[in-house]
Amino acid sequence: IFELLLSYLQADFGLARKLELGQLYTLAVGGTFLYQAPELLFNNSVLSKEKEKVKQKSDDEEENEEEEQEQEEEDIEEKNKQNQKETIDVDVWAFGTVMFELLAQRHPFFTNKNITPSEFIQKVLTHLPAKLPSLYPDQLKNIIMRMLEKNPNNRISASEVLVELDALELSMKQ
């Protein structure tokens, strides 16, 4: 099973971006919602709330000109772009989510397919991931859980994932 896991990789390159030499991040413009890291979900949640405030303010003040509202929305979008940098940490999170799903046959944060986006965001931001089945090695489960660390500063790095997976593979061959 472990060799199958490591040899089978599926990717969606629809939103892929090339990092230039020395570049550590890109500005986020989207992604598959169920695989977005908590830091991106949090920023998107804040952005939605700010946009709703602008809309309510506009509804309350009918005399408010459209240009003023559009400018306020553009300012919110620009602020969000500045706060929402996609580092390799978000890719580690997404890969951890995929690995979890391959092993557990479910998403780490929900089982109900009818979950609303706001419920999903709340679960990812406030709950721990579910436990992986006991039939897998503890070392593998630990790697995946470290990939699903909510704080990107404490999340395992991509290079550490590779080193630890190689070490796990070697230990399993012995």
Image (tube, rainbow, N blue to C red):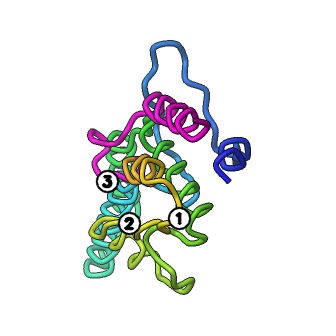
Give the side of residue 65 with respect to residue 30, left or right.
left
Is 148 included in the stretch rendered in magenta? yes
Q: Which of marks 2 and 3 precedes in the sequence?
A: 2
SS of the residue at dot 2? loop
Give the residue furthest to the top.
Answer: 21
Q: Amino acid at mark 1?
A: Leu
Under circle 1, the secondary element is loop
Q: Residue at x 57, y 54 (%)?
A: 99
Residue at image position (57%, 41%) is 172
- The answer to whether 148 is drawn above or below residue 82 in the figure is below
Comes first in the chain, label 2 or label 1: 2
Q: In this rendering, which labeled residue sits more in front, label 1 or label 3?
A: 1
State the extent of the magenta-drawn residues as a range.
147-174
Compared with 47, 9 (above or below) is above
Q: Which residue is mark 3?
A: 150
**Label 3 secondary element:** loop
| Cβ atoms at labels 2 and 1 below 8 Å apart | no
Question: Going 44% across and 39% down the picture, which residue do you hit?
Answer: 86
Residue at mark 2: 129
Any mark on residue 135, and which?
A: 1
**164 in relation to 96, above or below:** above
Q: Disc 3 and disc 2: Cα gap in Å?
A: 10 Å
Mark in the foreground, 2 or 1: 1
